[in-house]
Image: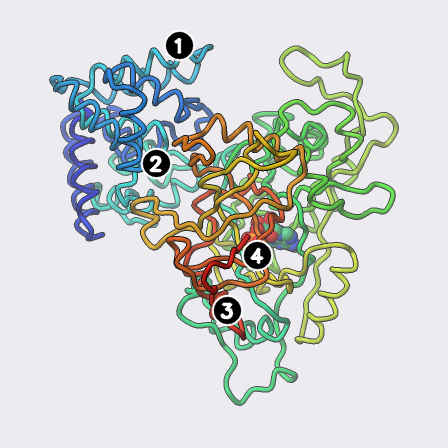
Amino acid sequence: MALFRELAELAEALAKEPGRLKKRAAIAEAVRRVHEAAPGTEDAGRFALYLAGSPFAEADPRKLNAGGALLSKALLSVSGATSVELTAAYKRHGDLGAAGYELMDKAGEQPASLTLDDVYEAFAEMAVAKTTAAREALVIGLLQSATPLEAKYLLKLMSGDMRIGVKQSLVEEAIAVAAEVPVTEVRHAVMLEADLALAVHRAFAGALKDARMRLFHPLGFMLANPVDSPEEAAERFVGKSDIKATADPSTSLRFAQDDTSLDTVRIDAFLEDKYDGMRAQVHCGDSRHPGRVAIYSRNREDVTESYPDLEEAFSKVSEAGTGSLIFDGEILGWDLNEGRALPFAVLGQRIGRKRVSNAWREQVPVIFMTFDLLYADGELLLDLPLKERRNRLEAVVEKLVEHVRSPLTVDERKREPQGLMFPEPDGEGVERLLLSPSRLVESAEDIDRAYAEARARANEGVMLKAADSTYQPGRRGLAWLKLKRELATLDVVVTGAEFGHGKRAGILSDYTFAVRGPHYEKTGELLNVGKAYSGLTDTEIAEMSAWMMDHTLEDHGFFRTVEPLRVLEVAFNNIMRSDRHVSGFALRFPRIVRIRDDKPVNEIDTVVRVEEVYQSQVDKPRLSNGERDA
Ligand code: AMP
């Protein structure tokens, strides 16, 4: 039976080892050792899963439901430290696990006897625990039987962030080395089944080829790179045969040959409107789970319960005989009279709601605008060129469009205690599946015109997608470009907040925000770039303020540092170099465009992007002494 100590010791060593290959070798050796000590058990799989920082496999819907507040309370109880000591330790390390190590060290050493099975059992119980107190008791139980080093990594694992510079992709490589199988086979199995532990089992059993796609776990989303003008977009697609599916955006920005006129070269790319809604993946039509629907956000969260109207509509796919499907697209608030998208701010009011009343269904009707098909009836389509995926998508939508409907409102009395009984639509119901119009474009002028038309339809801009590109899950490749011509905005995370004045006295309404620093991957480094207070509605500010009270890390009276979890999109007039913030930059006249709870913190902008935007300014302003940036 493998000990958790082995995992904690390896994690500690990996955190100090900068070399990727050495890390991989160390992980591979450990996984092999654990496997050989207990072949055929769950040990090696769990070891790899935990090392990658996940308490449960991705396909497993269970959650620990243990936030920073709960973990801190348990740590205080086991270590006997005061909250002042915990705050000071947290401040020194910026990480609850490391703070825990320091505090537990003072509480004395325990013999290392905790097994991976013990950890698994406690996690399983936490997932079904009915009360916070019960969950806290389980964490206390774990920490009590842990050495300080084990406590450090238990806390990191439970908060889902190991910070040892080991991504899942490195663990996948190590599994391949350990079991002497090709890494592509390991990765493919993980993509199909979303279960790293199962992949370890399969790898050692020589059964990776038996992995079959399962629905109901999110695939990675393909992302786009920004361009600033139709000309730049056109240039990037010229000579697109040079753009390999895996082209690295950092290596080259221009693909046009010097002597090629843009007017004469055809661009083989599809153009669509860029909708300002919420990116989502819809899984439906599985005959083994008739009527089951799952909707995943870009954060890989299951958000189905927030969209019962879509769930009802897509549950009908099972009846249409298309087999299982995975759609990629955008959830949009929809103006039923005008037949066009509502502004994001309107949809935003529904995002995150767990119970959606008839009033909300009526006030903000939603539809799913699909633009890609990732899986159809037993076949994963990611490796097909976009033009073929598009053909398949059009055929499927044509078959389904009449079926995928649901009523605007439902008879709330018919709701069953455990969820919804899917009611038949009154009359026709609302068509919930729409196909994003798409066409081939040929020139910069063509793109320019389409951009103007998209803006006239109140969409954000346009997307360009190479017609022969494969779907690259989780990649921001060069095959998809987005063109939004307004001044750049940045996605940032709130790190602190100040109380406001006047009618905002007592409300945390002025936010300090940060971008990812160069050492983010390893240490979670975030660098502040600005401060903003305008742009949100009173309701949003009240909600943010309450959240920040609950997620305060340090209370300095007027100012509080908060857990860096809330992502904002901020606009600004320009960027200047400044020593006011640790990033070395400050934004001038920043304003909040919107709250972006749909975007994970590990995808916010980086200080490198800030530098790029800074460099792209014709006049690069410097902050004069004493000038305020907000
Ligand atoms: P951003 O959030 O600025 O990185 O832009 C990428 C986002 O654009 C995606 O995550 C989608 O939510 C969104 N998007 C809107 N329309 C489309 C479209 N037609 N194709 C792909 N993505 C789109």
> Which residue occupies the foreground of this view, 126 or 350?
350
Q: First in sequence: mark 4 or mark 2?
A: 2
Cβ atoms at labels 4 and 3 below 8 Å apart: no
Residue at the front extreme? 626
Q: Secondary structure at mark 3?
A: loop
Rendering quarter of residue 367: top right
Disc 4 versus disc 2: distance between alpha carbons? 27 Å
Disc 4 versus disc 3: distance between alpha carbons? 17 Å
The residue pinned by badge 1 equals 134
Image: 124 above or below 472? above
The residue pinned by badge 3 equals 621
Q: Say which of marks 1 and 4 sits in front.
A: 4
Q: First in sequence: mark 1 or mark 3?
A: 1
Q: Say which of marks 3 and 2 sits in front.
A: 3
At 18% from the left edge and 45% from the top edge, which residue is drawn? Answer: 16
x and y percentages locating residue 144 in the rendered image: 22, 14
Disc 1 versus disc 3: distance between alpha carbons? 55 Å
Density class for disc 1 (Cα within 10 Å; few <14, some 14-19, many ≥20) is some
x and y percentages locating residue 109 in the rendered image: 12, 19
Cβ atoms at labels 1 and 3 below 8 Å apart: no
Amino acid carrying mark 4 in the image: Thr
The numbered disc on residue 161 is 2
